[in-house]
Image: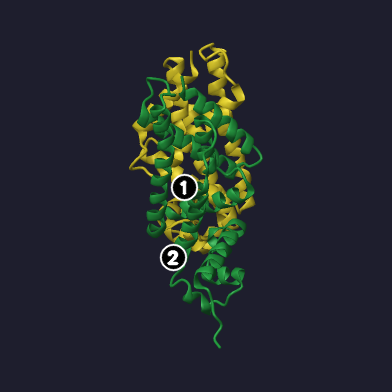
Chain colours: A green, B yellow
Amino acid sequence: MPKIVDHDKQRVLVAEAAWRIIRRDGMEQASVRNIAEEAGVSVGSMRHYFSTQSELLRYAMNLVSERVSHRVQKMSFTGSPMDNMKCLLLEFLPNTEEKLAEMEVWYAFTARANTDPTLKELANTVYDELRQAVGSVITYLIKLDLSRPDLDKELEIERLYALVDGLGIHTVLRPDQMNAKLMDDVLTLHLASLCR
Amino acid sequence: MPKIVDHDKQRVLVAEAAWRIIRRDGMEQASVRNIAEEAGVSVGSMRHYFSTQSELLRYAMNLVSERVSHRVQKMSFTGSPMDNMKCLLLEFLPNTEEKLAEMEVWYAFTARANTDPTLKELANTVYDELRQAVGSVITYLIKLDLSRPDLDKELEIERLYALVDGLGIHTVLRPDQMNAKLMDDVLTLHLASLCR
């Protein structure tokens, strides 16, 4: 009887092996051969899951984004409006070990995406989705009449989005200096500064 | 008579060739062989300039940082304090084609640095230097008594630094959405919000 292999599960296992290699050894080492070895599958069987290295990397990059989306969809907003907005923003920030690992991998993927059109398209889609989520915070502040009356909506969206990404990247670059507590404090300060 | 080669000039030429490859083809293609070809020198002669690929990449990364430092040192601060502070911050942001090219390369280097200790040490040094420069803006605002009286100095330094890096990275990732005008507007808004 042939061995029954769950293809979707295998693809996830291979993608997670790619993440480990990228984090530990760098994007330069993310060859199909190295990833197969890390995942504990034969190089020959890899073609059942991904037809090219490019397809594999795109899948592994997309899996990071899906994990984040999944967490956001599961969120329940039970606090005050300000708390809820901060919680939403913190969901995109690496304030746990698991999320820091995801962000390190995401950083490596976006760097590679600058010279890889397949990854770039995905990077751009996620950039727009995250801008949309950040934008909803500013829109919500205005709608609830919590914000200063003179708020420049579009400019504040760009400012908040740059701040969120800057905090995340600083945590990836210097986890000894930027951390969960400091990110929370900076976001609290920033949101308060937007309000009356 | 032997050909006289200016070693320092050659090292810069080779480093600039490395930048072009990193921007055009990605860090994965930045082999000594590819860089030699791009620089128009023989692979054999490369050992006169750099003993290892790692040394070459460190030199090329450091050259980006030196170019930025050089520009900052040449700055003359002749405007109002607020203008001077904004000009200093804008000097670290990719608001010209040349600086965007530098930042693209820097982004690729910092991503690689996460798994390369030689580059990581340099990345950390530059991270601290830039934090120092951003910190001087906040300190200056307080010293000139322009800032709100309740300003939390350390928190505001982290906020401004994350904002500056976020704006820079957004320009690298989406030059179609983030640009020189928008970076200037966001920084103007942010600095004004810190003041009385």
Q: Secondary structure at mark 2?
A: helix
Which residue ends up furthest to the bottom in the rendered image?
Answer: A1
Residue A40, quarter of picture: bottom right
- Residue type, numbered disc 2: Ser
Q: Would you name the residue on which mark 1 appears?
A: B105
- Check contact, mark 1 vs mark 2: CB within 8 A: no
Task: Please name the residue shown 38% across and 30% down the image.
Answer: A155
Percent across and percent down for residue B188 are: 41, 23
Task: Please name the residue shown 54% across and 26% down the image.
Answer: A189
Residue toward you, B3 or B156: B156
Determine crowd level at label 2: few under 14, some 14-19, many 20+ residues with C-alpha closer than 10 A: some
Percent across and percent down for residue A12 are: 53, 65
Determine crowd level at label 1: few under 14, some 14-19, many 20+ residues with C-alpha closer than 10 A: many
Q: Nearer the viewer, mark 1 or mark 2?
A: 2
Q: Would you name the residue on which mark 2 appears?
A: A54
Residue toward you, A90 or B73: A90
Q: Are marks 1 and 2 on the same chain?
A: no
Percent across and percent down for residue B163 are: 49, 33
User: Which chain does the residue under circle 1 lie in?
Assistant: B
